[in-house]
Amino acid sequence: MQTTSRFREFGDALRGRLIMPGDDDYDDSRQLFYGGMDRRPAAIARVADAGDVARAVTFARETETPLSVRGGGHSGAGHSVIDDALVIDLVDLRSLEIDVVDHAARAQTGLTAGEYTAAAAEHGLATGFGDSGSVGIGGITLGGGVGFLARPFGLTIDSLLAAEVVTADGEVLHVDDEHHPDLFWAIRGGGGNFGVATRLHLRLHDVGRVVGGLLFLPATPETIAAFIAEAQAAPSELTTIANVMPAPPMPFLPEEFHGSLVILAMLTHVGDVEAGERAIAPLRSIAQPIADMVRPMTYPEMYMPEEEGYHPLGVVRSLFVDTFGTAEAQTIIQHLEASTAEMRVAQIRVLGGAVAAVPNDATAYAHRDRAIMVNTAALYEQPQDESTHQDWVEGFAAALAGDDLRAYVNFLVDEGPERVRHAYPGPTWDRLRSIKAQYDPTNLFRHNQNIRPGT
């Protein structure tokens, strides 16, 4: 642990500012999105540029101070803020340059997905991130990025043209297909293991108005299976995220459905409005909708408002499946009915489309051939109930996945090193370890879903 004077000396060298315990904004600055984590870092460096990041990385390396990186603070394992660590907080890196002619953006990684999306939409353009507007663009991109535009345009990393990365030796590198191509391969899915991404050069796609929004259907084994079948058969312009869950007490839902199992589907169709209506029609016809809020809208409207100060307690498990029918749907119904969690969900993301058009070995995200991603999750209020809900979530995931343990790294929580290994199947793991040994041989960047250096 470094002395306060050593930290203050380091802080004086920053263009940004160093926040220490006792400072007025220390408690606000160490907050994470998810609840149940009361982390107390030694200091928080609110960096002003890549040079500040390099100074922070060098300080941590030379003083053997633990290091963590905070973008939007959405790490499910709480890796963004670590006890007794130096936190690199990217929140003030907010520059965004949009090139309308070349359909590209240069964005610093303190921006959130919602902020970037709103600015790009002013020009009828978009880059796909996830399904939360408050997530930082750096973290979601480095892990892959599976969201509302996955089927027409692929993962976020499929729109990544280049990146500015600060490596463990304090160098600021421009990384793309021609410059450090091995590192460029690794950061497209390998997470924060290889450095701190301070700026992303991203492709923008023509996305004017979309046909999108929420569609609520009754959840039965038949309707769930039919929904997934229709979503897979839909044109690639349509991306669906189906949440099978108890209906929340939303004011637009009839009261008699509150608490009943429903399919809460988030739909996004890119392109012609009439084509969007045709693509969505088979989903609407599965059953009489409980509520239908799908309409032509601007793309940023797909991000639902988030309650300020909301810090949920939850457990989640991520998995892939390649086949889905009434048997799998029945498993979902049975497990949801058996849970005591106030809010529990099976979230089903149909993949394919542009996601599958990229070879498995082209990036560190090596699940291109997987048809469907599923997350099982439980939200709860009392910390002492965690183990009960964790057992349920793990049993639910095992019932769907069987012996297939592969997972998407951005949806991993604190599940241990074996689960990280499952995020990188086949030769991907060995290649990542080799690149890690080249760029971070001492594993300075280890407070993440960690890939240890190796050969």
Image (cartoon, rainbow, N blue to C red):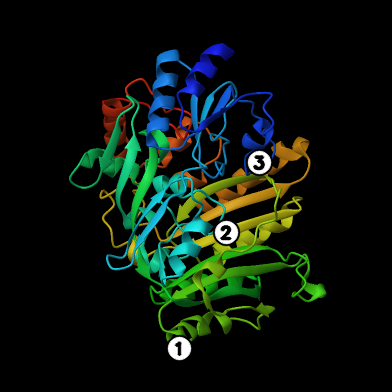
Neighbours of disc 3 within 10 Å: few (<14), some (14-19), many (20+):
some
| Residue that badge 3 annotates | 390
1 or 3: mark nearer the eye: 1
Say left or right for 196 vs 295: left
Question: Measured from the top left, where is residue 367 in percent x and y?
Answer: 36, 52
Question: Which label's residue is closer to the chain start, 1 or 2?
Answer: 1
Question: Measured from the top left, where is residue 455 in percent x and y?
Answer: 26, 26
- Depicted 219 relative to depicted 65: above or below: below
Tell me whether the residue at label 1 lies in contact with that at label 2, contact meaning CB atoms closer than 8 angstroms: no
| Residue that badge 1 annotates | 274
Element at label 1: helix
Cα distance, mark 1 to mark 3? 44 Å
Question: Measured from the top left, where is residue 358 in percent x and y?
Answer: 28, 58
Residue 347: image tag: 2
Question: Which label's residue is closer to the chain start, 1 or 3?
Answer: 1
- Depicted 450 relative to depicted 244: above or below: above
Element at label 2: strand
Q: Quadrant of the N terminus?
A: top right
The three-letter amino acid code for the residue at tag 3 is: Gln
Neighbours of disc 2 within 10 Å: few (<14), some (14-19), many (20+):
many
The three-letter amino acid code for the residue at tag 1 is: Glu
The three-letter amino acid code for the residue at tag 2 is: Gln
Neighbours of disc 1 within 10 Å: few (<14), some (14-19), many (20+):
few
Question: Measured from the top left, where is residue 128 in percent x and y?
Answer: 43, 61
Question: Which label's residue is closer to the chain start, 3 or 2?
Answer: 2
Element at label 3: helix
Q: Is residue 212 visible?
A: yes
Say left or right for 48 vs 335: left
Image quarter for residue 224? Answer: bottom right
